[in-house]
């Protein structure tokens, strides 16, 4: 699928981004061609490309190629692209979705969180979950597994994407 982004014709094919070269300086090339777009890694683990003298995250470009009605230049907190599996290098379209800031935080920051802690005062496991920047107490449990299960059930209720 081919699109024009920032004045540059690009496509996504076989898991790679390609740029169309048809001009050199002010003249047209006799033999225009597709060239692989160089990707660099950011300090945050994302891949990045330069298209039309502007840097883009690769996952945003790939999502845009498949969903051209989506505004790639809107960087507001309700227009983030999330990697469903949490792997920032997995930019397959099936792994990408639009989320807001809170939804993205649920997915990323709670991936390895147990959802419970040991409470010294009552000598039980305390389960809790954060919703809209507020912590909700889910109860106290004798077993860590029960506290963790309470957290997972609450996550399915409160952290719906």
Image: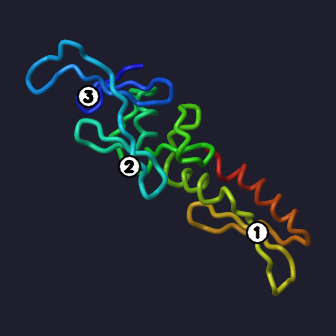
Residue situated in front as seen by the camera: 66 or 133: 66
Residue 54 in which image quadrant = top left
Query: Residue 116 lies in what quarter of the image?
Result: bottom right
Spot occupied by residue 161 in the image (x, y as percentages of width and height):
61, 44
The dot on residue 76 is: 2
- Number of residues whose C-alpha sits closer than 10 Å to that of mark 2, classed few (under 14), some (14–19) or many (20 or more): few
Report the front residue among 17 and 54: 17
Residue sitting at the far right: 142
Marks 3/1: CA–CA distance: 50 Å
| Residue marked by disc 3 | 8
Q: Position of residue 98 (x, y in %)?
A: 50, 40
Q: Residue at x 57, y 61 (%)?
A: 132
Q: Residue at x 25, y 33 (%)?
A: 6
Q: Which residue is mark 1?
A: 116
Q: Is residue 114 above or below residue 57?
A: below
Secondary structure beneath label 3: strand
């Amino acid at each position: 699928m081919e699109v024009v982004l920032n004045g540059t014709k690009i496509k996504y094919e076989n898991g790679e981004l390609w740029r169309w070269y048809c001009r050199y300086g002010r003249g047209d090339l006799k033999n225009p061609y597709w060239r692989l777009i160089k990707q660099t890694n950011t300090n945050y683990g994302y891949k990045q490309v330069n298209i039309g003298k502007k840097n883009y995250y690769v996952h945003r470009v790939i999502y845009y190629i498949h969903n051209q009605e989506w505004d790639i230049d809107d960087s507001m907190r309700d227009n983030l692209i999330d990697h469903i599996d949490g792997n920032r290098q997995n930019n397959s379209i099936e792994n990408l979705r639009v989320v807001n800031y809170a939804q993205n935080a649920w997915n990323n920051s709670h991936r390895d969180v147990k959802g419970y802690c040991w409470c010294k005062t009552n000598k039980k496991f305390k389960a809790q979950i954060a919703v809209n920047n507020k912590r909700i107490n889910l109860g106290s449990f004798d077993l860590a597994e029960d506290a963790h299960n309470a957290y997972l059930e609450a996550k399915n209720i409160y952290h719906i994407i």
